[in-house]
Image (spheres, rainbow, N blue to C red):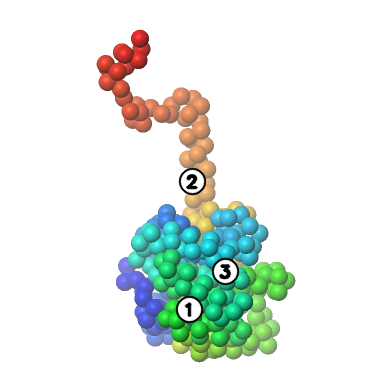
Amino acid sequence: MSERRRTIPAIREAKRSAGAIPLTMVTAYDEPTARLADLGGVDMLLVGDSMGNVVLGYEDTLQVTIEIMADHVGAVARAKPEALVIGDLPWMSYHVSIEEAVRSAAALIRAGAGAVKLEGGARRAAVVSAIVDAEIPVMGHLGLTPQSVHAMGGYKVQGRRSADADLLLEASELLEAAGCFALVVEGVPDAVGAAMTRARSIPTIGIGAGPGTDGQVLVLHDLAGLSKGRSPKFVRRYAEAGELITGAVAAYVADVRNGDFPGPAETYGASEELAAHLDN
Ligand code: KIV
């Protein structure tokens, strides 16, 4: 396996046009998923606000607060992964003022992240530059940005029309100039992902952005088969871990009901003396 790219300078340089192999990132929200994903050799672990939908059972990401994010960043960091841990700034933690945005980013760094990610284009450039000025590396996120679900009128592919694609490319230029070390590009036609990748000197990390980006990111629960419902088009399910867990629980339930569990191997035996004492 190739060496991990886990420092900001190493990730910033990882352009495929310069011969780099594609970057890899998956989400992790807790210690076990961080540990397991890290063993899989991923370059970056994203503590995404997708935890709102994926593990907290909300309809969207908008209920996730900076306190919730910091708790989960801490859990992921305690796995001591080799991968770079990136904390997602949740909605309303960087929209009200630049000062609050810098404090929110600092809260995730203090919780154990090595960088933060935030959503949005031109309107976020000043916030990105203030966070970078505080020595905190920032990953941008363009295209289908789930925190804008209401403004977008749903989770819809972005940049399908030439004018919209041009706006995304302009936004990517502003975010690079503001100091982002990488950009997530989500839910755009493949040509937009590829054009952004050609235009930028920082790496692009695609999710539903086609094969032309510098790296890929997926939600761990989607690729491992732990998510409910139909997967989005851009997901490839590499395992059916949900079926494994349900099968394991069903086997346990059956064993308890038929008296097979616990057996001698799962039981603390008493000495003969203690057993005789208790039998009387
Ligand atoms: O919150 C998240 O998990 C994300 C990824 C899907 C990129 O932003």
Residue 255 seen in this snapshot: yes
- Counting from the top left corner in percent of width and height, residue 69 is at 52, 63
Which residue shows up at 26% across the image and 16% down it?
A: 273
Q: Residue 159, located in which quarter of the rendered image?
A: bottom right
In the rendered image of this protein, does residue 202 appear above or below residue 4?
below
Name the front one of labels 2 and 1: 1
Disc 3 is placed on an element classified as loop
- Of callouts 2 and 1, which one flags the residue occurring earlier in the amino acid sequence? 1
In the rendered image of this protein, does residue 139 appear above or below residue 222?
below
Q: What distance separates the C-alpha of mark 1 from that of mark 3?
A: 14 Å
Residue 191 seen in this snapshot: no
- Of callouts 2 and 3, which one flags the residue occurring earlier in the amino acid sequence? 3
Q: Name the residue under label 2.
A: 244
User: Given the current orientation, which residue lies at the most extreme right position?
Assistant: 153
Which residue shows up at 40% across the image and 70% down it?
A: 84
Which residue shows up at 50% across the image and 85% down it?
A: 129
Which residue shows up at 61% across the image and 71% down it?
A: 92
**Which numbered disc covers residue 138?**
1
Disc 1 is placed on an element classified as strand
Q: What residue type is labelled 2?
A: Leu
In the displayed structure image, the side of residue 42 where residue 154 appears, left or right: right
**Which numbered disc covers residue 252?**
none
Disc 2 is placed on an element classified as helix
Q: What distance separates the C-alpha of mark 2 from that of mark 3?
A: 32 Å
Name the front one of labels 2 and 3: 3
Q: Mark 3 points at which residue?
A: 90
Q: Which of 163 and 269 is in front in this view?
A: 269
Q: Which amino acid does label 1 sit on?
A: Val
Circle 3 residues within 10 Å: few <14, some 14–19, many ≥20: many
Locate the C terminus by quadrant: top left
